[in-house]
Amino acid sequence: MEPIPLETVIVDQEIVKELQCGICLQIINKPRQCLQGHLYCLDCISQYLKKSQECPTCRTSLNVEKLSRSLFVERHLRNLNVWCKYHFENKGGGNNNVWEVDEQGCNEILTMENSTRHENTCEYSFEPCKLSSDCGLIRKIQLVDHLEKCPKRPIKCDHCLIEYPFSDIDKHLLECEMIEIQCDKCNTKLLKRDFETHKLNECPNCHVHCPFFDSGCLKMFDRKNLQEHIDKSLGEHLILMKNNYTQSISSLKKDFNQQLKEKDDQIKKLEKVLNDKHEPDTKIEWCVKNYSIAKKKGYIQSEKFVLGGFQWFLGFYTDGDSADSKGYISIYLFLDTHQIPKGKSLALEYYLKFFNHRDPSQSVKKEFRTTFPIKGGRGWGDRKAVKSALLDSSGFIKDDTLLVKAEINVKKTCWSIDQEPDT
Ligand SMILES: [Zn+2]
Ligand SMILES: [Zn+2]
Ligand SMILES: [Zn+2]
Ligand SMILES: [Zn+2]
Ligand SMILES: [Zn+2]
Ligand SMILES: [Zn+2]
Ligand SMILES: [Zn+2]
């Protein structure tokens, strides 16, 4: 807010014109005069003389040295009667410098000289309301009165004992949860905050569903009559529950079977993908060196090899593997049974051949077709593949080495999650 202009506070407004500065037209501040007695503020005339060397009123030649004080005017100014500035009130709303006499204001008349001392302690001076900036400035003398009536003064709610600004208390009373109200159904008096719970769980006159609603009893009662209904309808409720239960189970079963079928289809698809994978053929040439010594052990076994994810080996008995095959070579393809993946089986076509070095067309070739793993056994072959004596002569042995050839084709790889029943 701008300071109040000197012109406003001067009591005798007739004097104002006589004490005006000829340049700024306000009451003279630090008066200086020309030789003809024309009066100006010191600042105003000093500024003016920088551009022009004459009095702006009478045009008499003038410079700063020729200016003189006027003790008369100075004394006159000091003793000038002025209103205390709190005689007025700014009506401009902050920015406009519009001042009007306020009937509520200070009525002291002072001399200019001692006005400041009075104004510093004047009880009509303004102070802000400490409760709210919305109240604006309040005269000191009215402050106590204002605080008692201030719209923002704190006031305690009688129900919850919390303080609210006076202007908000009506709104609060509409919302206060600690106000006592009466239930419209049973006339019980209770706090507003407990009303919801009362209606939901306690009020004897509230209309409620039978607790077996979920099971299909759709009846409604005043809460006070509920127990009677439950006591009377025990059998009815049991039947409802049973039907409900049966329905749930059957729909669960349906869902479960549906899911099972979907999983089954997925597994079948996966099986097909796996089964369609082609296994390359395996060819084996097995040199049995130092045959004349090896055959005395009665059984000769090849190195192990891997095929279709399984481990295999060949083996033959040089004098049969049982009484009725005595005198024959019994030869087999064996599955190394330690490492059979569950649910996997291989359909094989293969031959085992004793190679004749002298005349390959005289080689002994045995062909087989079977599925591994073999039920109740490890290997599949021929227990009377060839007479033992024939191998010892006729060109099968060269440099005491017997050559066994084999070719194994995987016709099909099968996966199944079915567990074979234990037998
Ligand atoms: Zn001036
Ligand atoms: Zn002059
Ligand atoms: Zn005053
Ligand atoms: Zn206030
Ligand atoms: Zn309250
Ligand atoms: Zn009630
Ligand atoms: Zn019921």
Image (cartoon, rainbow, N blue to C red):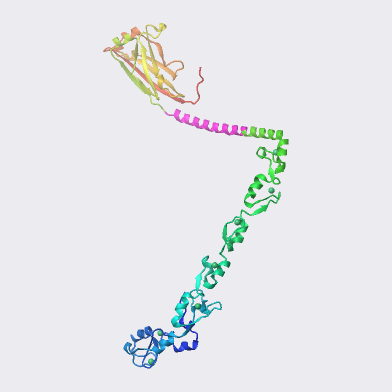
Residue 142, given in percent of the width and then of the height, sits at: 55, 72
Residue 54, given in percent of the width and then of the height, sits at: 35, 90
Residue drawn at x 37%, y 83% is 43
Residue 236, given in percent of the width and then of the height, sits at: 71, 34
Which residue is nearer to you in this view: 350 or 371? 371
Q: Is residue 337 visible?
A: yes
Residue 368 relative to residue 192: left or right: left
Residue 104, given in percent of the width and then of the height, sits at: 55, 77
Give the number of callouts. 0
Which residue is nearer to you in this view: 377 or 403? 377
Q: Does the magenta-highlighted stretch encompass residue 255?
A: yes
Q: Does the magenta-highlighted stretch encompass residue 214?
A: no
Q: Which residues are drawn in magenta?
A: 249-277
Q: Is residue 139 visible?
A: no
Residue drawn at x 40%, y 11% is 383
Q: Which quadrant of the figure has residue 151?
A: bottom right
Which residue is nearer to you in this view: 264 or 6? 6
Secondary structure that dominates the magenta span: helix
Q: Identify whether 113 is placed above or below 296.
A: below
Residue drawn at x 47%, y 31% is 270
Which residue is nearer to you in this view: 256 or 21? 21
Taking the image as four quarters, which one is ligand 4 found in? Answer: bottom right
